Amino acid sequence: MFGLVGLPPFGDSLWMRFPPLSRHVLPIIIGLIILIRPQTSDAQTTLTWQGESGGEWNAAGNWKSDSESDANWVDGSVAIFPLVKGGEIAIDMPGKIVATSVWVQQNTMTIQGNGPLVLNVNPEEKPMHAFRAEKTTALDVPIQLDGGGSQSWLTGSRDQELIINKGISEATPTGITFAFGTLVLNAPSTFTGGIIFNNASVVIANDAGAGTGPLIIGEGKSVLSTGGGDRTIKNNLTTPWVGAGGANWNFEGSGTLTLDAPVNFQGAEAGTVNISVADGLKVIFKQGVVPPPERRTQILQGIKMAGQSGTLVLEGEISYRGTTTVESGRLVMNGTSELQKSWKLTAPGILSGTGAIGLAGTEDSLAASGTLSPASDDSVGILRITGDMKILSGFRYLWNFGAKSGEGDRLDLQGAVAMDGTGSDWKVIVCPAAGATLMPGTHTYQILAAQGGVADSAVSNASLELDPSLPAGRVSGKLQTVNGGINLILTVK
């Protein structure tokens, strides 16, 4: 898509206005100018608007520069401003300026003023608004999109931050396609066309920073981040297409990111949405994973959590039909799923929740060798599974007891519990929920119920481990197979 680094893409309307021969020669000339220009570490340039309100960004004579040595400064026009290593540029905009194409390069750049800066989009020309800085571009000016229903292309540099400090509105319905670098949304916005981000990061540092349209995770390693702190956003989260090769959703930041709108996948192939949640971050799909009604039977994709150790919480209706795999982090299933192909839990992944997992048939099951904790680390609850469970070697059941005798976590299956071979050793770890204590005496808990029965070797292959917070030498326990389930009997001296 790009020619030489730092030059407009060959499809850009501004670039295509040059005659064919010029388009071959101009990159060489500009490249030589940039190379021979003195590379000062403290260069600073201020551009001041001299034109009328509503004038064209690139029109000749509209800008005044306080630097006379700028090699590409031609007749007061800011079309391509050359990169100065270590340099800074400040652009003052007292009023409205309309930009059909922006292509500005500098080490650090600030655009400030009352504005707005109108990013105009001609759907036939598909211009690109490129704010290319080696470090940071701060837009301290209101941004207005005017695209007539099309997308406004924004682009940065791979290691650059493009910071929106005064929000984005629209004159006509318009969205943003952002490629490369990091887009930081610090202020409320009202545009409706949504954001497509490809090989880029979007930091939502304000709950309304992304406007009201969808967030569409596109190609490559794209990242959605909170920037630190808790965020609740009402944008639909989706991906344009999940083929056999899958898609990648990466969540960064800290605190809690709540997506208070339905999440959905696109595509009819049985691909996988690979989800990575950063350490210390919790992401909540509050309104479930719900495709449009006309596509419900086509959502064959699954979810795979891998890479980092954060938490993903599924609430509401979960209607994708592929396999769910938890390889790392914690997946909390608090929603209700339709019939899915299977679930796979492997170490060090953790499966929690008090929802209901629906499995499609007798050959589909929850295969577990990771850690299962039906509620959470400080409460008790029941996780329901419409199907079978297969216990693999290394499986850990992190089980909490409550404040009342007989109250504790339970795994409730409509199917059966099978063992994956005679050597499938597994462990029940006994822990107190918040505020729970064990009184002297004998306490019986049903920790697993299976309508289809429990394999004979399930208890013989299991071992008990007591949490260190329990009084040493005063608590003992044993497991029993009873009426198609497993009971835990704790004796306290």
Image (cartoon, grey):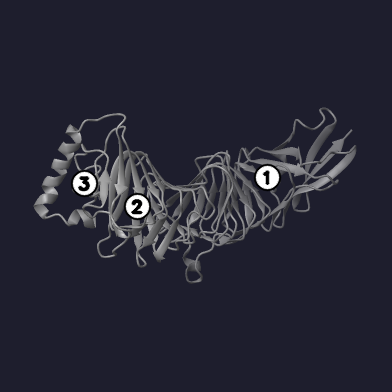
Q: Which residue is denoted by mark 2 in the rendering?
A: 154
In the drawing, does residue 240 fall left or right of residue 208?
left
Say which element carries label 1: loop
Q: Is 431 drawn above or below residue 312 in the view shown?
A: above
Q: Residue furthest bottom?
A: 294
Labels 2 and 3: the sequence-earlier one: 3
Tell me what residue is drawn at x 52 percent, y 40 percent. Answer: 308
> Is the Cβ of the residue at disc 1 closer than 8 Å to that at disc 3?
no
- Quarter of the figure with residue 330: top right
- Residue type marked 1: Ser
Residue depth check, mark 2 versus mark 3: number of the one nearer the observer:
2
Tell me what residue is drawn at x 69 percent, y 48 percent. Answer: 374
Give x and y (percent) for residue 120: 32, 60
Q: Which residue is denoted by mark 3 in the rendering?
A: 3
- Residue type marked 2: Leu
Q: Which residue is denoted by mark 1 in the rendering?
A: 373
Mark 1 Cα shell of 10 Å, populated few (<14), some (14-19), many (≥20): many
Quarter of the image with the C terminus is top right
